[in-house]
Image (cartoon, grey):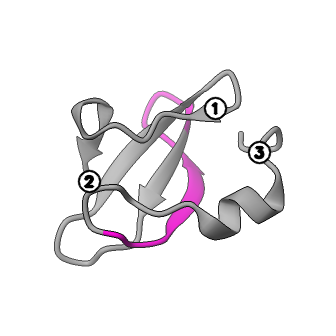
Amino acid sequence: MTENVDPWVMDILRCPVTGATLVPTTGPDGSPELHSTDPDRPLAYPVRDGIPVLLETDARGL
């Protein structure tokens, strides 16, 4: 999932929309994602080839 992302990078990554921290998880189809921890606007961002895609246009609501 995010095994290719250095731990220090995961510590500083934030949701570009809300500023909330991100946690690694998997999407409904089993693909890797990062989920925003924002309680009011949770978003999921894809991880493609080990690279988090933190674009609002690629995010999906949770």
Q: Name the residue: 26% across, 54% down.
A: 62
Residue on which disc 3 sits: 5
Compared with residue 36, is residue 3 higher up or lower down, i.e. above or below? Answer: above
Which element is circle 1 on?
strand
Left or right for 29, reference 32: left
Mark nearer the N terminus (3 vs 2): 3
Counting labels gives: 3
Classify residue 51 as left or right of residue 6.
left
Q: Quadrant of residue 58?
A: top left
Please say whether residue 13 is one of the residues in the magenta stretch: no
Q: Please name which of the two marks, 1 or 2, marks the residue nearer to the observer.
A: 1
Disc 3 marks which amino acid? Answer: Val
First along the sequence among labels 1 and 2: 1
Residue segment shown in magenta = 19-32
Determine crowd level at label 2: few under 14, some 14-19, many 20+ residues with C-alpha closer than 10 A: few
What kind of residue is marked 1? Ile
The residue that appears at 58% across and 52% down in the rendered structure is 25
Assign a secondary structure to mark 2. Answer: loop
Judged from this view, the residue extending furthest toward the left is 40
Dots 3, 1 in contact, CB < 8 A = yes
- Tell whether 42 sits left or right of 36: left
The residue at 34%/55% (across/down) is 16
Q: Depth-wise, is mark 3 or mark 2 nearer the camera? A: 3
- 30 or 34, which lies in front? 34
Q: Splitting the image into 4 quarters, where does residue 40 fall?
A: bottom left
Instruction: Give the numbered dot on residue 60.
Output: none
- Specify the label residue 51 is tagged with: 1
Is residue 31 magenta-colored?
Answer: yes
Residue 48, position in %: x, y? 59, 24
- Crowdedness of circle 3 by 10 Å Cα count: few (<14), some, many (20+)? few
> Which mark is drawn over residue 62?
2
